[in-house]
Image (spheres, coloured by chain):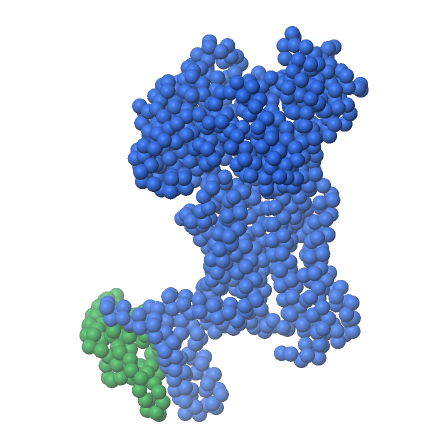
Chain colours: A green, B blue
């Protein structure tokens, strides 16, 4: 396994929303996609499903049962309009935050 | 927000489907993960394990998901309730045992609370600002009787207290007693409240009809002859007639005009009576004693006062005492009573409820005891249920350990066990209220005189009490096993489960068992002591027969008769009584046991000083038929004859102990004594009768002498004893009707059986015996169930070990001895602890017993035998089961 980074607090939701922005996916695929793209981020699987259900409750994602690529019944999550808005807002906030943090860190160096 | 709500609701209502979906979703994830590893070249089994490790505890995740969905609280609660309910339904025997146990405990306490509340805590209905309303007591030191506290005062004193104090907003007096209400055959004795008009100002209760009487109608000296009916009396005697106002009603010796009807439930201020009618205190008093408002002769009123807001109890007491001292001076000048420096007169305010004041009755003390007993039974019940649940929890140890290992949080498990306990307690509570309704009526009839047959759990307070009790029981019974189960080492439990290894005794469980046994012993000892007391009381010869006697008063009610008329009336009454079939005999009487006693002071005996110091001398007078009628045995000499008449030689029959006291070591027959003043002629003793107890059951210095009625000059209403064949109860009403016909004018005949008069004296022992026997048996049965279930459970758990023993050659006798020994050792431990408690508590119980030591070894031995026998029976069945263990089956299992 490659070196792994711990996920900062509150970023899991953002990552899930981002992963779903590319199209509907089931839970396992979301975790795989994030891992593959980042190469380092390991989604704590115990938190993935509670996060999904929380986002569903908040109305940012919607769920539907469908057939998976190997033809098994799977629950697919999809970004709602509210979710897309939330993703934009969160991304912007994240960018600002990281930029600001980076700035401070660079100055200190 | 709205969608959020909808989501949660859907989650709640489609819980089953959602749970299935969640399972599917997680299983799908694990499969994909496994597939991934398999594709990487892992063996399938390793891949599965790897996937599971990466995923973590499934149960924990599910729990988190449920929480994320926002339904977990209600959801899990519902789930637990359903789970618990299912569990209880699959074990109907266990559930029934627990629910019954709790029902009896909760029921007994609820029923007792209703009574204790009414006697001790609750204010009378409609009372305004009950916190500031008090009963007034007076206290002084008398020369012969020492310090005395009394609650009855004179009307004059009431006027003094009212006029000479400033601490009170309102003051009032009340006197309840039985008076004859109505005329002719419908005349009955009823509770009549003589009340000052100010009484009504204490309440927030408008009259149901008409009005209350006013201060003008309650003015010294004579008031007005008006009456306010009690609601119940108005219903039963006037059929709720709305035109009752203005009608007249004969009460005692006077006729009153009805001016109002009190609202339903209005009784004034009293613990246990519901008066039929209220009349002005002045109107009644003036017909009895015309100087009642000027002299201090007649103490008959209970006084109540409401403090002004802001006036403390201490201030009020000081104020009252000052008024009492001033009033004492007035009385001292009038009547020459002892000076204040000897008497130390003091007055104070106390609680309205009599049972909480300084003059609490024996009955209210017993009520408190019974409440304590009921609490013990509830404790036994709780211990029992906790024990049963504990046994179950231990049996489920493996299940619990498994769930903990699967990631169920401890809090969640605790919740589940508590839910189970609460469910049981709730079922028990509901059944308990039913028990209280059914058993409470009997209790109520014993303790409260009120005629209303109101259901026991009718008021909110009792209901709240039983709910609080149920919750408490739920916590106690649910929490103990829950904590016990959770504090076990998960790994060890999983490894050993319930079958392997040695059976480990639970200290908590054994402690509860011994505790139950000990409490049953305490109650059974109480039962034994009270039963023996009752036996003593019942077996006691009172000096007259009780069951075949009817007591008759011919209440003249103000009708004045000349001597010949009076004699003619008595002859007619005798003839009428004797004519009733079944009547054997009749006699006139002047004293009535435990009702009214005549006295002429101590007799003067030549050569002896101060005979009054010997004891209390009481007088009875009767017809020549007296001794035969009441069944008093003449030991020596003779009874009375027709020859003992007015003007003849004065004769007397005296009791054995009086003879012994006056002429110790000598023959009293033929001796003489003098009654009353020095100029009276001497009376000769012609007979010695057996001792008589008619004032106190336990007084050894109660001396009676009998005079022929012809030589006793008493006026007043004639009284008779009538002896019947069989039980007096069957004749009482028949006699009353027959004799009423002979009564002139408004005069009124009244009958009571002698048993009615004697029974209240024996009541406290009878009651104590009944209560302790009932509750003691209950506690014993509960303890037996507890012992049985624990031993049976232990045997079931030790099947493996027993199998090994049998395989190794243990005989049936060995096994029996082992199991029975275990059961008996619990019983012996309980017996020892219980006996110690009973011995220690004995000194508080002894005053309530009747010529019975609280440490009677016979009672303790008997209780011990009973307990051991019950323990043996409870253990025998599981013991026999232990001997039937098949070693091959036991060892092969698991």
B789 vs A70, nearest the viewer: B789
Q: Which percent across, then down, holds residue B751?
A: 55, 34
| Above or below, B608 relative to B432 | above
User: Would residue B410 be found to the left or right of residue A86 on screen?
Assistant: right
Q: Which percent across, then down, holds residue B439?
A: 53, 51
Q: Residue at 47% of width from left, 57% of height from top?
A: B430
Name the image quarter holding residue B38: bottom left
| Above or below, B330 relative to B790 | above
Q: Residue at 70% of width from left, 34% of height from top?
A: B541
| Above or below, A82 relative to B744 | below
Q: Residue at 71% of width from left, 50% of height from top?
A: B864
A84 vs B415, nearest the viewer: B415
Count of picture labels: 0
B347 vs B822, nearest the viewer: B347
Residue B358 visible in image: no
Q: Which percent across, then down, holds residue A51?
A: 32, 73
User: Would residue B817 be found to the left or right of residue A40 on screen?
Assistant: right
The quadrant of the picture occupied by the N terminus of chain B is bottom left
Q: Which percent across, then down, holds residue B740?
A: 51, 32
Q: Residue furthest top?
A: B679
User: Would residue B80 be found to the left or right of residue B372 on screen?
Assistant: left
């Amino acid at each position: 396994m490659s070196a792994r980074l711990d996920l900062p607090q509150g970023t899991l939701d953002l990552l899930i929303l981002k992963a779903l922005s590319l199209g509907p996916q089931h839970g396992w695929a979301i975790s795989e996609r994030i891992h593959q793209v980042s190469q380092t981020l390991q989604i704590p699987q115990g938190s993935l499903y509670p996060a999904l259900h929380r986002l569903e409750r908040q109305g940012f994602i919607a769920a539907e049962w469908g057939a998976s690529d190997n033809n098994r019944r799977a629950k697919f999550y999809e970004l709602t309009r509210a979710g897309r808005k939330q993703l934009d807002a969160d991304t912007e906030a994240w960018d600002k935050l990281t930029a600001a943090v980076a700035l401070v860190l660079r100055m200190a160096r | 927000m709205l969608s959020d709500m909808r989501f949660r609701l859907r989650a709640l209502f489609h819980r089953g489907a959602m749970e299935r979906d969640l399972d599917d979703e997680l299983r799908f994830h694990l499969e994909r993960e496994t597939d991934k590893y398999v594709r990487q070249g892992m063996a399938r089994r390793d891949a599965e394990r790897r996937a599971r490790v990466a995923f973590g505890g499934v149960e924990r995740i599910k729990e988190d998901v449920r929480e994320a969905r926002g339904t977990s609280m209600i959801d899990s609660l519902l789930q637990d309730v359903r789970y618990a309910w299912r569990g209880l339904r699959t074990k109907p025997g266990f559930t029934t045992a627990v629910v019954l146990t709790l029902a009896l405990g909760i029921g007994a306490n609820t029923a007792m609370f209703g009574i204790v509340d009414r006697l001790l805590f609750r204010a009378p209905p409609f009372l305004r600002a009950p916190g500031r309303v008090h009963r007034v007591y007076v206290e002084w030191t008398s020369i012969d009787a020492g310090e005395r506290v009394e609650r009855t005062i004179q009307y004059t004193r009431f006027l003094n207290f009212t006029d000479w104090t400033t601490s009170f907003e309102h003051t009032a007096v009340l006197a309840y007693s039985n008076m004859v209400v109505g005329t002719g055959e419908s005349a009955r004795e009823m509770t009549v409240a003589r009340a000052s008009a100010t009484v009504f100002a204490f309440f927030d209760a408008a009259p149901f009809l008409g009005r209350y009487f006013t201060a003008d109608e309650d003015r010294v000296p004579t008031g007005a002859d008006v009456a306010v009916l009690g609601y119940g009396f108005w219903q039963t005697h006037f059929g709720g007639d709305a035109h009752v106002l203005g009608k007249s009603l004969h009460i005692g010796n006077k006729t009153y005009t009805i001016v109002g009807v009190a609202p339903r439930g209005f009784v004034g201020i009293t613990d246990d009576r519901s008066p039929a009618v209220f009349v002005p205190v002045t109107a009644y008093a003036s017909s009895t004693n015309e100087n009642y408002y000027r002299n201090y002769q007649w103490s008959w009123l209970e006084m109540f006062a409401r403090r002004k807001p802001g006036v403390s109890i201490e201030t009020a007491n000081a104020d009252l005492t000052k008024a009492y001292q001033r009033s004492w001076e007035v009385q001292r000048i009038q009547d020459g009573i002892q000076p204040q420096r000897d008497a130390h007169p003091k007055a104070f305010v106390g609680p309205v409820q009599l049972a909480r004041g300084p003059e609490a009755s024996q009955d209210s003390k017993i009520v408190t005891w019974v409440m304590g007993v009921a609490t013990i039974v509830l404790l036994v019940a709780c211990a029992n249920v906790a024990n049963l649940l504990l046994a179950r929890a231990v049996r489920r140890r493996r299940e619990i350990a498994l769930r903990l290992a699967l990631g169920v949080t401890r809090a969640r498990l605790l919740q589940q066990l508590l839910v189970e306990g609460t469910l049981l307690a709730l079922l028990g509570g509901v059944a308990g209220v039913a028990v209280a309704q059914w058993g409470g009526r009997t209790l109520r009839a014993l303790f409260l005189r009120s005629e209303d047959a109101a259901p026991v759990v009718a008021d909110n307070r009792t209901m709240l009490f039983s709910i609080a009790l149920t919750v408490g029981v739920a916590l106690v019974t649910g929490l103990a096993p829950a904590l016990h189960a959770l504090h076990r080492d998960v790994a060890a439990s999983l490894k050993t489960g319930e079958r392997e290894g040695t059976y480990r005794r639970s200290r908590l469980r054994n402690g509860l068992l011994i505790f139950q046994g000990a409490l049953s012993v305490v109650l059974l000892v109480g039962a034994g002591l009270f039963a023996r007391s009752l036996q003593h009381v019942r077996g006691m010869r009172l000096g007259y027969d009780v069951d075949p006697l009817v007591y008759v008063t011919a209440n003249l009610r103000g009708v004045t008769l000349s001597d010949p008329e009076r004699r003619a009336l008595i002859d007619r009454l005798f003839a009428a009584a004797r004519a009733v079939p079944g009547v054997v005999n009749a006699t006139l009487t002047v004293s009535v046991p435990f009702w009214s006693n005549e006295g002429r002071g101590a007799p003067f005996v030549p050569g002896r000083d101060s005979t009054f110091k010997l004891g209390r001398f009481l007088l009875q007078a009767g017809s020549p038929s007296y001794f035969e009628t009441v069944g008093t045995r003449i030991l020596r000499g003779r009874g009375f004859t027709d020859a003992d008449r007015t003007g003849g030689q004065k004769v007397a029959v005296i009791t054995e102990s009086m003879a012994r006291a006056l002429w110790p070591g000598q023959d009293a027959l033929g001796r003489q004594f003098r009654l009353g003043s020095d100029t009276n002629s001497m009376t000769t003793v012609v007979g010695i009768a057996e001792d008589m107890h008619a004032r106190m059951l336990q007084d050894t210095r109660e001396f009676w002498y009998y005079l022929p009625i012809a030589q006793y000059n008493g006026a007043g209403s004639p009284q008779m004893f009538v002896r019947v064949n069989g039980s007096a109860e069957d004749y009482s009403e028949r006699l009353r009707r027959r004799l009423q016909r002979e009564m002139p004018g408004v005069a009124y005949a009244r009958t009571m059986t002698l048993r009615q008069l004697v029974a209240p004296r024996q009541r406290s022992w009878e009651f104590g015996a009944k209560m302790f026997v009932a509750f003691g048996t209950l506690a014993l049965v509960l303890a037996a169930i507890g012992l049985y279930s624990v031993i049976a459970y232990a045997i079931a758990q030790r099947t493996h070990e027993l199998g090994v023993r049998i395989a190794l050659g243990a005989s049936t006798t060995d096994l029996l001895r082992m199991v029975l020994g275990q059961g008996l050792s619990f019983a012996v431990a309980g017996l020892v602890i219980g006996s110690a408690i009973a011995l220690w508590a004995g000194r508080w119980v002894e005053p309530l017993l009747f010529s019975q030591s609280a440490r009677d070894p016979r009672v303790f031995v008997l209780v011990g035998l009973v307990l051991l026998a019950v323990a043996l029976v409870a253990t025998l069945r599981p013991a026999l089961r232990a001997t039937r263990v098949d070693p091959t089956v036991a060892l092969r299992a698991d």
